[in-house]
Amino acid sequence: MPGFAPDGPFEAAIVMIWMLSTASLVAQQGASAADTLAADSIAVSSPLPSPALIVVRFLFNTVPQWVQIGGVFLAAAVALLLAFLGWKHRRSIATWFTARSRAWKMGFAAACLVVLAGAGFAGTWSWHYMMHDNEFCAGCHIMGEPFQRFGTSEHAKLGCHDCHRQSIFASMKELYVQVTERPDRIPAHRTVPNVICSECHIQRDPDSTWQRISATAGHQVHLNPRSPAMSKLECTTCHGQEVHRFKPVSETCAQSGCHDDVKVELGAMAEQTDLHCTVCHEFTVAATEGNPIDSSRAALTPTDEQCLGCHEMRERMGRFRPENEPHEAKCGTCHNPHVQTTPDGAFQSCATSGCHAQSDTLTAMHRNLGRHRLQTCGACHGAHTWKADAVDCRSCHTGIRDPAVRTRPPDDPGIFLPGAPPHGPAARALPGGHPRISRALTPPARGL
């Protein structure tokens, strides 16, 4: 109470009652703040903190920061003033001190040691509370759900500052913003860099779990320094933007923002909870030690074996044999694996898929000339066979065996151009293909 100086037992009792009531109010506020923090933090049922902890939490989490900073500057100014006055009157002080009794000097020295020890203990304890106690961070960062996940994860034994670290300059800048502007939104910390994750997760033991996981194709492609497109990724990019709960890669491929250019339309297949990116892209396959990048990229590319693991379509495959397939038996060459569609729309256009779009490899039949312009590739070629059987030709040319019909090859230079199998030169023609027709060796037509 300003301006009140007790000069009797009654007044002293009033002052004592006022101080006790104030301390009780501070303790209640501190306990309330602690209960709020406990409800939103990892310590859901934390014990009642000690009185000293209540006071410290009240000072740091309740008192406005401008008051805290002002108190620090005021204390520093008083300390400098006392030091200046003490130095100015040092001789008088020394004379007065030497005139005291031995017992007084011992008591004064003991009191100084107690004050210094108390100040050192309070400073050390306060520093530990601010830098290593998660409850201090929770005073501003109220994150109920993330902290609950954090409490059930392997990281629950860690402190916030074990992973979230920043420089002194960044801390001073954040303090300045808080004091001058008092923002309603707490700025997010920068992402946890890989070097911090590596302090615990990188182990040199060749038999460790980390060494086995780091050698997989998925980790080599994304984190190997020799992978130029991916070398700047952070661990948290795939394993959750916040690592309060570790997320497997099967849950984050589509949420990390890296593969936004890949459009996936699963339709009813989206209801299958066991279907994710790593079902087709084998993330955990071991990479080749001598060539980890290229071997990892090849391992992450789905093959026909993975496709046929779900699409058991042997009755639809006809005479398809992977060893004789000119497309190297990759289903994805013709099929879009990221779109669920009907069987009729399951294959892409042969001309636009990147294989048969060059005009210098197409014969007249493939250039949509004459009556064939209305036909599709599938009219002659089966979906899973590369040959066009003769019966396919006779299905359209029904009168080809009539005895009165004799034909001459049309006078079109396009038909004599070199073509791609099975319509190319005889030396290149596969079984069932047409040999090259030479104008010089073509006999004259008879009949019509």
Image (cartoon, grey):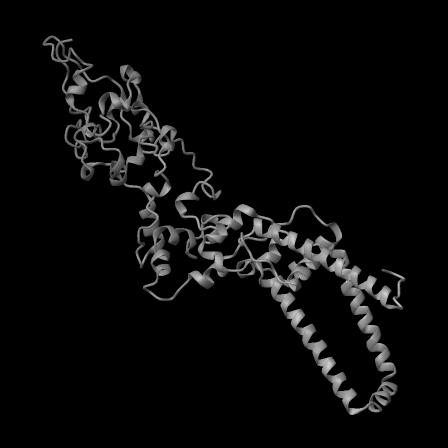
Q: Determine whether 236 is above or below 409 in the image.
A: below
What is the tally of numbered marks visible in this picture?
A: 0
Image quadrant in which the C terminus is located:
top left
Task: Name the residue located 83 percent from the left edge and 75 percent from the top edge.
Answer: 82
Name the residue nearer the viewer: 213 or 361: 213
Q: Determine whether 10 is above or below 332 in the image.
A: below
**Residue 60: horizontal and vertical position, in percent?**
69, 58
**Residue 244 visible in the snapshot:** no
Task: Name the residue located 88 percent from the left edge and 86 percent from the top edge.
Answer: 92
Residue 328 falls in which quadrant of the image?
top left
Q: Determine whether 254 is above or below 204 in the image.
A: above
Residue at the left extreme of this rendering: 403
Name the residue nearer the viewer: 240 or 121: 121
Q: Is residue 362 left or right of residue 175?
A: left
Task: Name the residue located 62 percent from the left edge and 54 percent from the top edge.
Answer: 34
Q: Is residue 57 left or right of residue 108?
A: left
**Residue 157: horizontal and vertical position, in percent?**
48, 60
Residue 344 falls in which quadrant of the image?
top left
Residue 97 falls in which quadrant of the image?
bottom right
**Residue 431: horizontal and vertical position, in percent?**
14, 31
Q: Determine whether 132 is above or below 400 in the image.
A: below
Q: Is residue 7 left or right of residue 370?
A: right
**Residue 168 visible in the snapshot:** yes
Image quadrant in which the N terminus is located:
bottom right
Task: Name the residue located 70 percent from the left edge and 78 percent from the top edge.
Answer: 114
Name the residue nearer the viewer: 392 or 211: 211
**Residue 149: horizontal and vertical position, in percent?**
49, 49
Q: Is residue 206 left or right of residue 237?
A: left
